[in-house]
Image (spheres, grey):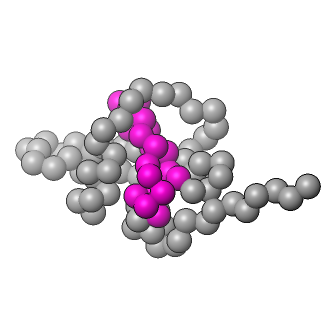
Amino acid sequence: MEKAIDIVKNAKKVEMARYADYQFQFPFKNSSENKIASYTLWVSQNGENLEIVTDSDKYVKLTKQDSEYLNEILTGEKLIKSSPVLS
C-alpha cells in the first residue's frame, strides 16, 4: 500500500472530461487527526495507463508499469488494454 500512496504524490491540477472509473481513499500517514485523502481514478482511453486526480485537484498520469501495479492492488484484476480498431 505504501507504494500505491507514493505513486500519486507528485501531481498537477487538471479537470477531466468524464466521470471517474474508480474512487478510493487512504488515511493520512503520521497524522494525529483522522483525515482521509480522496482520489479519483480513470483508465486512459487506450487502456494502458491510469490517471489520478487528488482531492486537491492534482493530476498524475502513471507509467504503464505503475498503472498495472496499482490497478491490480486496487481492483484485484489485471489492467485490460483496449485493442486497436481495425478498419
* Numbered range of the magenta stretch: 49-68
Dividing the picture into quarters, in which one does residue 70 lie?
bottom left
Which residue is located at x 44 percent, y 52 percent?
63
Front-lying residue, 24 or 60:
60
Which residue is located at x 48 percent, y 28 percent?
14
Q: Is residue 63 visible?
A: yes
Of all residues, the one furthest to the front in this rendering is 87
Front-lying residue, 83 or 44:
83
- Compared to residue 79, the image places residue 16 above or below, namely above
Q: Is residue 58 left or right of residue 26?
A: right
Q: How many marks?
A: 0
Q: Position of residue 44 (x, y in %)?
A: 59, 48
Front-lying residue, 69 or 57:
69
Which residue is located at x 33 percent, y 46 percent?
8
Q: Position of residue 61 (x, y in %)?
A: 46, 43
Q: Position of residue 48 (x, y in %)?
A: 57, 56
Q: Is residue 60 left or right of residue 86?
A: left
Dividing the picture into quarters, in which one does residue 72 lie?
bottom left
- Compared to residue 76, the image places residue 8 above or below, namely above
